[in-house]
Image (cartoon, rainbow, N blue to C red):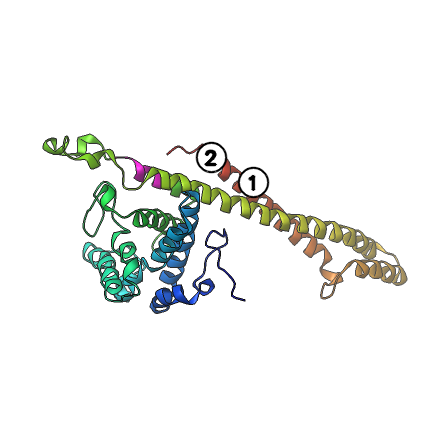
Amino acid sequence: MKEDFDFYSKTSLKSYNLDDRIRYQLKMLDSLDAYTRKHSENVASITCRLCEYLKLDQGFTIYCTTCAYLHDIGKMFIPPEVLQKPSRLTDEEYEIMKSHTTIGYKMCMNDPKLRPYAAGTLFHHEALNGTGYPNGVSANKIPYEAQIIRVADEFEAISAKRQYKTHIGIIETLNILIDDTKPNPISSIPEGLKILATETRLGKIDRKIVKALFKVVIDDTEYEIASRSDYLDYLKDEIKRFEEANRYYQKMEAAPTESKKEYFREGVAALLRRNESVDRVPETLQELQEAYKVRKAHIEKLYLEVKQIKKLVV
């Protein structure tokens, strides 16, 4: 019996989970470089979950998620020396990079089966206030699917490790997105356009979509806390076992006779499992204790992140 795919699942979406009808629309991803393909999958996963929190219907969610998979398909025609450049792009290179939107659009429009998803490729870098590209359209001229994809794309691109910058934390990333919801200062708008330019009341991205993103990030963080807490419980049990083994080990080391040493060595061995060495008991105990300390600190950091996210205002 054919298994139905749940687009509302909180698990990370992968193209191999999709049915044959959608698989055709995504096959072009195989031509992308590994980084861009992974980025596209991540953006699609975030997009799907944003749709869930925005309470959009399943049909639109499937459509929007597929658009997100295909949003960067035009990058397969961007020269590798530009696409994979390890440093910041020059102005000329940036113009070349920006062309992936129109290239992807043309690719979709030239294929009847991809044509329904062309909006995601063309509009995902447009901004509500008209400062985006390639056409600088604004507000409701930008399809809603592209508005959602833009938020998912920006979050994934900023928070991921890029070739030319170090990793940026989740809170810092969300603050950047919050800034992008804010309108440009009126002082920066030419005097003659202030009355007519309604887009001056808008930021680059939609506040409601960013609020939904907060929920996605909190979900992910709480899931990571739960998973890491399970492993922390495992480490606690392992430390307890090796502490007991170490007590026998210390007695073994201090034993005055060989027979006593052998007696305590057998006690140590009885507490160990296959491939665990009696001679490495103190070292292994120290490694476990250090691992517990590091992972406990990380969980505490995650709890703090959740609290900070809940305090963010957009």
Q: Provide the residue designation for mark 2.
A: 310
Judge whether residue 116 is colored magenta: no
Q: Residues within 10 Å of mark 2 (few under 14, many from 20)?
A: few
Residues in magenta, as a range? 177-183
| Element at label 1 | helix
Q: Residues within 10 Å of mark 1 (few under 14, many from 20)?
A: few
Q: The C terminus lies in which quarter of the figure?
A: top left
Looking at the rendered structure, the kind of residue marked 2 is Lys
| Element at label 2 | helix
Q: Main structural element of the magenta stretch: helix, strand or loop?
A: helix
Residue under the point 42% across and 51% down: 58
Using the numbered discs, state the Cα–Cα distance from disc 1 to disc 2 in whole angstroms.
16 Å
Q: Is residue 305 above or below residue 269?
A: above
Q: Is residue 73 left or right of residue 302?
A: left
Determine if residue 163 is in view.
no
x and y percentages locating residue 156 in the rendered image: 38, 51
Residue under the point 50% across and 38% down: 306
x and y percentages locating residue 112 in the rendered image: 27, 66
Q: Is residue 284 above or below residue 312?
A: below
Choose between 288 and 176: the one closer to the eye. Answer: 176
Choose between 313 and 158: the one closer to the eye. Answer: 313
Choose between 222 and 258: the one closer to the eye. Answer: 222
Residue under the point 43% across and 54% down: 45
Q: Are marks 1 and 2 in contact (CB under 8 Å)?
A: no
Q: Is residue 114 left or right of residue 1?
A: left
Looking at the rendered structure, the kind of residue marked 1 is Glu
x and y percentages locating residue 272 in the rendered image: 76, 60
Q: Provide the residue designation for mark 1.
A: 300
Q: Residue furthest left?
A: 192
